[in-house]
Image: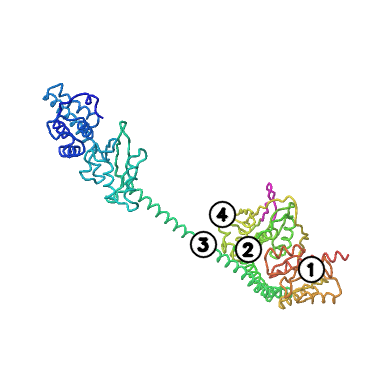
Amino acid sequence: PVAPALRRWRTTVTVQDIQNTVAQYIGPERARHSFRAFAATHPTSSDASAPADFGLLQHAEHLIASSIGAASSRLVMSLLLRKRTVSAKAALKLLDDSHAALHFNREILQTALNHVRQGIAVFDADLRLTCSNHQFSYILGLPLHLVQLGTPLQEILEFMGAINPSGEEDGKALLEKRLAAYTTEGEPHLEHLYGRQIVIEVRSNRMPGGGLVITFSDVTPSFEAAAALERANATLEKRVRDRTEELTRLNSELARAKSIAEDANVSKTRFLAAASHDILQPLNAARLYVASLVERQGGGEDGRLVENIDDSLEAIEEILGALLDISRLDAGVMTTSIASFKMADLMRSLEIEFAPIARAKGLKLTFVPSALPVESDRLLLRRLLQNLVSNAIKYTPRGHVLVGCRRRGQSLQICVYDTGVGIPILKRGAIFKEFHRLEQGARIARGLGLGLSIVERLARVLDHRIALDSNASGGSFFSVTVPIAKAVTVTSTVTGAAPVSKMPMSGALIVCIENDVAILDGMKTLLKAWDAEVVAAADPDAAIEAIEAAGRQITGLLVDYHLDRGNGVAAIRDIRRRFGDTIPAILITADRSPHVRATAQEEKIAVLNKPVKPASLRALIGQWRTRQMLAAE
């Protein structure tokens, strides 16, 4: 608006004065075009020396304000109109001085703005350009005529839309969208200038007196870095996805390979079990025949040869038994059946088994049982202790072997001492490996070095701790620690061991059931060599007929587990039902699985694995005959 003084005064300023003054601030060319356009729409004098009317003064003030601001424009117009109170020369001088001062200040401001990296543009309340720097035109790619003072913001945005088409929406909608974004104060506006291949950040701030200050920043490097990071993330996600798929595939292949390996292990175990049964059958027959020869020879060169054959067969038996145990343990098919039982019963059964062997070797074998009940798998613990006692006897050339128990808090430590060859300290870890034997042990006993490997595996399955103490000077100590049970859930009655030579056999009637003719004949021959009477049959029905024909009380049953019809446990059950529930029986089998032993134990049937050890067999039959004779008295 025009100052109030302009409305009251009667000015003497001419049209020419107005045009010259305006030209100094906005340029002659623009001033000429502006006044020509004003004259076309407003009635005014065409005489340059004519006094300027109120409309022209208002137009001039507006033009000057577009260059130096409204306040400065009013000052310039006031100085120009003071020509009525001061001389024309003084007024012009005052105008020139003010113009020079304003121009100097503007130049300083412009220079400062041109050194700013961002583009800066100032628009008045009518959104006309009043000030800008070089970066403004450079960043937006504007021609010179669009950076002149007074250029509307809309014209600038129209030009930007023309050279940077987005192709996504029509020009008018895009113009309105841009105008709204450029005139909204607050969050920055990002715009991709496709024509210049750059991304700019536009920030708008309103001025107190009206108008806008808009800054333009080239954020292309940051945008490209963000885009590169996004691409990297996308690539990373793809790599992670690909790697995950690869790992999933490898895991699937590993699972398949593991399944195949487990199936192979199970198949191997089944094969070994089946093959061992086929191998142990003739081996069992051979041992029975050899044992009969040993009984008949009694000495001499032939007797020594027969004993060597018996030793060789026994070694084969130990190897096959160890291989079967290793295969079942490694395949993970050996499961545990934890129960509470008296340790004394288990130790007495071990004494019966090993007393004849130790006596034959000239060793003193002593068992010191414990009355405490323990909690473990009876069959697997017995197998573990069998290996420890067998090793102690095997590697003790002379002296004694002691098996005893010590209470350790809530556990029972079962100990095996011997006066054997001893174990060097540096070799203690190696002796539990498969097929590893110490040099001094290999010189005095045959074997493959599998016994302690089986002990270590059984202890791991049972979760029992194994301890070893020994030295190279002689003597060894092995122990296994077992939890003490609160109550007994499994009971068994085992009689004490008696010397084999004192076992009475005369008058004993033993029933043998075996579907293998060679084994049946070998068993019959051996029992007769022990002065026992034998009823031999290939199946339970034939055995029952033979027992009825004998017409006397039988001493015991020796029955093979695998029969042509049914199994040995069922056969023993049928015979007991017919002739007496208390008839003692032995189940003879090549199947070393815990299931078979557990089934036999439920029926109170002893178990001997093939090949049968004659000493163990004679010890058991001798106990039967002793009880039978005592009952008859």
Drawn side of residue 190 relative to residue 471, left or right: left
**Distance (Cα) linking label 1 and label 4:** 52 Å
Q: Which residues are magenta?
A: 403-416
- Label 4 close to label 2 by CB (< 8 Å): no
Q: In the rendered structure, find residue 425 and report the number of the disc placed on it.
A: 4
Which label was assigned to residue 599? Answer: none
Where is residue 122 drawn, in percent x and y? 27, 37
Compare residues 488 and 95 and report the one nearer the observer.
95
Residue, disc 3 = 252
Q: Which mark is residue 573?
A: 1
Disc 2: which residue: 333
Going 67% across and 74% down the picture, which residue do you hit? Answer: 283
Residue 206 in the figure: left or right of residue 393: left
Is label 1 in a helix, a strand or a loop? Answer: helix
Kind of residue at disc 3: Ser
Residue 191 point in image, percent of width and height? 32, 46
Query: Badge 3 local density, few (<14 within 10 Å), some, or many (20+)?
Result: few
Name the foreground residue: 599 vs 314.
599
Q: Which SS class for mark 2?
A: loop
